Image (cartoon, rainbow, N blue to C red):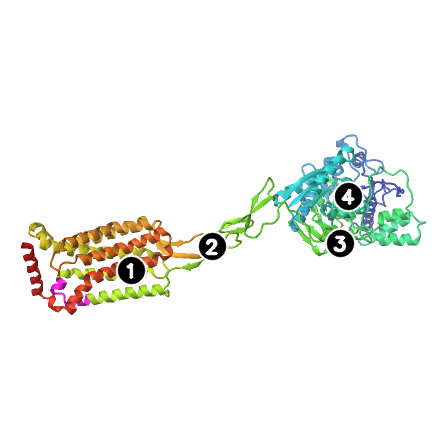
Amino acid sequence: MGSRVLDELKFTEGGRSKAFQDCIGIVESRGFLAAGYRQFQAMRFAVEEINNSSELLPNVTLGYHIFDNCVSSINIQAALDFVLGNSRWGAKPCHGLRSCRPGVSAVLGPWGSDSAAAIASILHLFHIPQISYGASSEELSDKARFSSFFRTIPSDNNQAEAMVLLVQRFGWNWISVIASANQYGQNGKRRVVELASERGICVAHQGIIQASGTASEQETIEMINRINFSRVNVTIVFSSFNNAKIFFSAAVNENVTGKIWIVSESISEERLTSEIPNIEKIGTFLGIAVKQGQMPGFGDFLAKAIAAQNPAMDQDHLTSARNAANSKIYSQGNCAQICTECQHFTSASVQTILGPSVWSVSFNVYAAMYAVAHTLHLLLKCDSGSCDKSTTFLPSQLLEGLKRVNFTLHNNPIYFDENGNPPMGYEVIVWDTEMESRSMKVIGSYKPNPGRLIINESLIKWNSAAGTIPTSNCSGECEPGQRKKQNGFHLCCFLCENCPAGTFETNAECADCSLDQWSPEQSSTCYNRSVTYLRWDNTISIVLSVMSSTGLVLTAGITLIFVVYLNTPVVKAAGGKLCFLMLLTLASGFCSVFSFIGKPNDVICRVSWPLFTVSFTACLACIFVRSFQIVCIFKMATKLPKAYDYWVKYNGQYVFVFASTSLSVIHCTVWMVQQPIVTVINYSLSQTEMILLCATHNDLSMFLSGFVYTGLLSMLCFVFAFLGKDLPKNYNEAKYISFSMVLYIASWAGCMLVILSGFRKYLPMVQALATLLSLFGILAAYFLPKCYIILFKPQCNTTAFFQSCIQDYTKNRVA
């Protein structure tokens, strides 16, 4: 026997086929692989179960013929023998492709992907289905090239994904990928690198394990040293067994320690740890292994097969063989040519085949055999309790039937997808190198579509200095509140930088906080700002409210006094009925103070500034008209009588007040449309406060634009008041008007300073104070003196007193 088996399945209507040769022995040499023997027996076991079944293929017997698939020449020979037919099968020999009638229904095997591809290419031409139990190359999923190929082992794409998910599970992102030089290793390595790149895992080193030779040995040593003397602690080895043995032997010789090795299923299948001395020193081995299915009775069947060929073996050896066979199966050995000489089993050879073992693909052979049987069950119409032996079919019909087969074999679903792949996943194992037997144990599983990995970490004994999960990262994880700055070619290599104030760390990047949040430097979260505005329960707000209310009360009191004493000389000299318009605008100004208190909103912000501006403009216009009229009466009426007559005749004072106020209204309207006032959040990146206030994009320009017009009116008021400084004292109000105008300019200049200084937090309070000072300035300087005369000096509020004052002014002016 050689290392593996290439099985041809023949459907016969009579007795058992004689294709199974009598010579089934073992050569005590390096060239024997126990796995091949076990897989051959698994196929026999499945065939006998099927032939003895009264349900699957009643009254139909399956036959088989076995070839060793150790070398390519035997593979091609076997495939051609299957296709061309021979006298043993009763098939007509071929003298050309068109005259061929293959004498086989299906082909099981072989193991290697290269051999499977070679045979699949031949069988593809004749539509003969091939079911491989060990060829995992993704290339074989190409139905355009291999339309008749199926398999009961998952493809290498699934295995590569399982390896990458295992790397992700433990947070590693800095790995090496090593592969054998054959197609199996190269395709697997390429897929691992692709998946790793897609999932943010960096491949620091890639390497190829060449066959034995001086040059290749030196390359292997250099590759191992690159891994050993780097920060890479995790290496994926996607390799065939022989190449992996070369690599790990060199790793032991180079004193590699404390590494993590994730090995492919072809390495997990072999008892590598028992063959390389001191291999446990190089680190922890995690592996991807073929999922083990249940085969009830196979252990006894295998033990009986050995016993049947070895009648002289004592009972103790048979018991040992039976017990070992009932455990999971393990494989070891090398490839050899077909055995030419059969020998009986010995105790050593039995231990080689049935000794303490873990992994096997025997179930894959078993499942492949049953897949064919279930398809034949449908083709031969065996549902009635017996099969229709008169039914004939071509291999192509069996091929189409396999595409639709779907059954459960000992709780394992068996079917093939559109690429001929099974639904099976993998098991994840760990090599327990602490025990003398160096056993392997299952720690999890991988399920495809979609890829899911389930791991029990408590079962892993990490072979590291601290006994904990080793790390394998180019750069250590950044602290909370830091972002990654790439350092070098690989994304996994980076420097850590603190996130600036006003930002927070998320997924190793710095993102801006929202406007209503803040953060200090190196923060991983944003904090809500405390909302700050001039609240109603604030002491300053209470003071401002009291002052504004006082102003309203005073304004109401003055209005009442002026109503009562409307026809007295003092009220007439103050402006008469025009005084009520002034008092109304002052009351409106006092009301605007309340708009600076409380939480601002768009409505309040749009009303507060125009309300004061328009009101104060109307008040200044009234003061200007009153000053202008007094000066005209005493100094200009005689010089410009017609002008004064027009002023009086056409109510010039009301026209001027209306025109001035209208201009102010137009100005505020245009200003609100072009530069609308909104609620603005005044903040800095690290401030914990969120200041709500009414402002524009440029608060200074806002105030300046208002001062352009009101400032002009105040200057006119001041000029005409100055011109009347020598008038009778009842009409001389230059100092009062000047005082109120200076107070107005000074108070609003303070607002500008607040804006320029950056202390905008206090702007609403300063605006309210400036408004109150401006209003109280006019109220105190213009109206209260007149109320004082009316209430406390009634003798001065007579026509005679005013006339005497005018006469004194006239005499002094003539003199």
| The stretch drawn in magenta includes residue 482 | no
Q: Earlier in the sequence, mark 4 or mark 1?
A: 4
Residue name at image x 85 percent, y 51 percent: 301
Hey, what amino acid is under mark 2? Trp
What's the distance in space between the residues labelled 2 and 1, CA to CA? 33 Å
Q: Which mark is residue 592?
A: 1
Name the residue that disc number 3 marks.
410
Give the label, 3 or 4, closer to the camera: 4
Q: Earlier in the sequence, mark 2 or mark 4?
A: 4
What's the distance in space between the residues labelled 4 and 1, CA to CA? 89 Å
Hey, what amino acid is under mark 4? Val
Q: Sort mark 1 into few (<14), some (14-19) or many (20+) by Cα contacts within 10 Å.
A: many
Q: Which mark is residue 518?
A: 2
In-image side of 88 versus 450 (left or right): right
- Contact between labelled residues 4 and 2, with CB atoms less than 8 Å apart: no
Q: Earlier in the sequence, mark 2 or mark 1?
A: 2
- Contact between labelled residues 1 and 2, with CB atoms less than 8 Å apart: no
Relative height, residue 693 to residue 188 (above, below): below
Q: How many marks?
A: 4
What's the distance in space between the residues labelled 1 and 3, CA to CA? 88 Å
x and y, in percent, of residue 685 in the image: 45, 52
Q: Which mark is residue 656?
A: none
Residue 74 vs residue 810, the one in the foreground: 810
| Disc 4, SS | helix
What's the distance in space between the residues labelled 3 and 2, CA to CA? 62 Å
Hey, what amino acid is under mark 1? Ser
Q: Sort mark 4 into few (<14), some (14-19) or many (20+) by Cα contacts within 10 Å.
A: some
Name the residue that disc number 4 marks.
252
Query: What range of the chain is rendered magenta?
Result: 559-572
Q: Earlier in the sequence, mark 3 or mark 2?
A: 3
